[in-house]
Amino acid sequence: MGKLAFIFPGQGAQYVGMGKDIAEKYEKANAIFDEASEVLGFDIKKMIFEGSEEDLKITENTQPAILTASIACMQPLLEMGIKPDVTAGLSIGEYSALVAAGAFPFKDAVRLVRKRGKYMQEAVPLGVGTMAAIIGLESNDVINACKEASYDGIVEPANFNCPGQIVIAGEIKAVDKAIEICNQKGAKRAVKLQVSAPFHCSMMKPAGEKLALELDNVKINNLSIPVVSNVTAQYVTDSNIIKELLIKQVSSSVLWEDSVRTMINDGVDTFVEIGPGKTLTGFIRRISKTVKTYNIENLETLDIFIKEEVKKCN
C-alpha cells in the first residue's frame, strides 16, 4: 500500500472566506481561527472570513492567514484518525507542514509567520523588486538566463515548481532583462507576478537575519512525521537543523518539484493539498501522471476525499 502526504500551499493561494464552511461545521477547525485571533491580538478570523482582498494581500496578514486556514482545514482529517506518512509545504506552507509534524504548536507558528511576513516586506522597499513566472523552459535555461541578466542587477530562480514552470525574483531591471532572455530562449510565456516583494532570493537575507532572532524564542520538538524541506528537497532528519533551514528558506530557491519527487520515490502515491486553492495539486499532476491528488479547502472538497479515500478504507 502506498503512502499518504499532506501538502500545504504558499502565498498567493489566499482568498476571503477560505476555510469558513469547514469552521462552521467542525468545532476544532473553528477553534484554530479563534486561537489565531487571540495570539495575534486582532480579529484575523474576521479578516479571513469577511475582510477585503486588499487587506489579505498584505504580506504580514497573508502568511498567518494561510497558515491558519490550512491548519483549520486539516482538523476534520485528524478527527477521523487520518494522519500522513510525510508532509511538506511550499514556502509559508512549510510552517503548516511543521505544525502538522509536531515541530512546534500552532500558536508559536502563527506568531512567527506574522513576523516573517513583516520582515520579508520590510527587506526590500516597494517598487525595487519583483517576480516573474517563466513557462515552458528547462531549468538550466532559466538559471543561465538569470546569470546573463545579473549584469543588470540581482535576479535569481526563486521557485522550481514543476516541469516548465519556474519563478524568478530580483531587482526590477534585472528581472525584465531575464524575461527578455527567456523569451529569446523560447519560453512559451514570461509573466510578471503581482507580488509586493522579490521573495526567495538573496534580497531577502535581511529578513532571514531578523527571523533568526525570533526563532531563538521558539522551542523545536522532535518531528512525529517526516518533513521534506524546501531548501534541500530532502527529509529533515534532525530537528536541530529546522531553525537553520527556515532562516535559509527566506532567501533560497524553493525546490518544490524535487521535493515532490523525493516523496514519490519514497512510495507516496496520494497527495492531499490542505488549505486554500489547488495550485500544488496542479504542479503535482505535471510532475507525475500516476499519483492521486486531492485538495481540501471547503466542505465540498472534504466530502470528495472522504467518499473516495476514507470510505474505501473502512
Image (cartoon, helix red, strand yellow):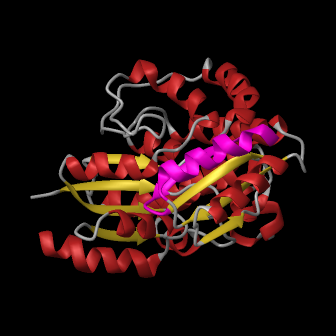
Residue at coordinates 65% horizontally, 51% vertically from top-left? 168
Image point (53%, 70%), residue name: 277
| Relative horizontal placement of residue 201, taking residue 123 as reference (left or right) | left
Q: Which residues are magenta?
A: 138-164
Left or right of residue 252, residue 288 in this image: left
Residue 157 inside the magenta-drawn segment: yes
Please indicate, yes or no, whether residue 35 appears anywhere in the rendered image: yes
> Residue 226's spot in the image, x, y percent?
30, 38
| Residue at 71% across, 28% down | 205
Q: Nearer the viewer, residue 14 or 158?
A: 158
| Residue 14: image location, x then y, percent | 64, 64
Residue 264, x across and y down, in percent: 25, 53
Towards the viewer: 140 or 312? 140
Q: Is residue 100 above or below residue 192?
A: above
Above/below status of 234 relative to 171: above
The residue lying at 29 percent from left, 65 percent from top is 288
User: Is 68 colored magenta in this rendering?
Assistant: no
Q: Position of residue 147 (x, y in %)?
A: 65, 40
- In the orientation shown, which residue stands out farthest toward the front? 184
Q: Quadrant of the N terminus?
A: bottom left
Tell which residue pokes out farthest to the left in this image. 1
Q: Is residue 267 above or below residue 217?
A: below
- Quadrant assignment for the C terminus: bottom left
**In front here: 26 or 44?**
44
Please give the count of numbered marks on the rendered protein. 0
Q: Is residue 92 visible?
A: no
Dividing the picture into quadrants, the one containing residue 212 is top right
Q: Is residue 214 left or right of residue 83?
A: right
Q: Is residue 4 above or below residue 124?
A: below
